[in-house]
Amino acid sequence: MRQKGYAVLNAQGVCELTGCGMDELMTLRPSWDELPPDNYLKDGGRYRRRRHSSLVVRGEAIELAPHRAHWQPLEYNALHGGMRRWFEPLTPDVDQSPAWPRLLRSLANVCSQVKGVQPWYVEAHQFRIDTEGGIGRPTPEGAHRDGVDFVAVFLVAREAIKGGESRVFDADGPRGERFTLTEPWSLLLLDDERVIHESTPIQPAGEQGGHRDTLVLTYRAGGFLDG
């Protein structure tokens, strides 16, 4: 990540990083079946479901912050920037899972190795993008930064779809790379100051609609991004 501004880990690498067994990580997966619709999509789509919670990681301590709106400025999200979007929080079965604090702490440790030990203000997003309408857009805002320090994108499930290619580009140059996360609990970790990213639309791979589930954790120093 220091060299390129991003890193990709397979599921085994995520297990080693977090100290979680794959069976522990998979206990989180059923909660994606209970995500409410995202009612803020300005493109008129109905293809996205999500939840959102905010936390603060201080060393080993993890504090669940009071529920708050997700907000980004227009400079980072041209489609939804400037909106205070209130999503339902993550459910208690996620917060109480043994794997959850290990995920949060392990990534905070990586962030501190790069930018120094400090509290990290974390926003956790569960996404399901489906193809019931024929196409789903993981990043309807296009290639973007999130206005944080680091972004972790975990692929949780990929069912009966095609597309969903991840694309990462230098924020200040022409270099870019593209690849597709296919393995459950593989990870794309991004230095948000150095790169921009997007995921291409998904389509059904067969007659039945499919979906793509991701967990996105953003880490920011100094406080949450608020309008």
Image: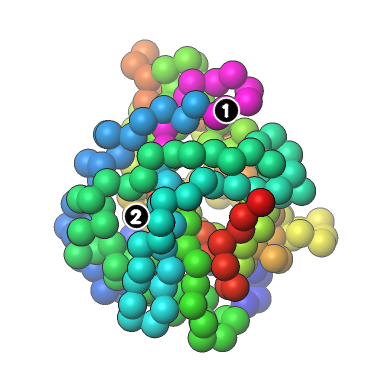
As for residue 48 lying within the magenta part, the answer is: yes
Residue at position x 63%, y 23% from top? Answer: 43
Q: Amino acid at mark 1?
A: Leu
Q: Amino acid at mark 2?
A: Trp
Q: Which badge, 1 or 2, is on the more N-terminal residue? A: 1
Q: Is residue 210 above or below residue 5?
A: above
Q: Which residue is mark 1?
A: 41
Q: Is residue 108 left or right of residue 170?
A: left
Residue at position x 33%, y 80% from top? Answer: 60
Magenta residues?
Answer: 40-50
Q: Position of residue 112 (x, y in %)?
A: 51, 81
Q: Is residue 29 left or right of residue 57?
A: left
1 or 2: mark nearer the eye: 1
Is any part of residue 152 visible from this angle?
Answer: no
Q: Position of residue 66 (x, y in %)?
A: 41, 56
Asked which quadrant contains residue 36, the reply is top left
Q: Which residue is mark 2?
A: 185
Say which of 40 and 158 sits in front: 40
Say which of 84 and 107 sits in front: 84
Which of the image's four quarters has the N terminus?
bottom right
As for residue 55 lying within the magenta part, the answer is: no
Label 2 SS = loop
| Farthest residue, direction right | 173
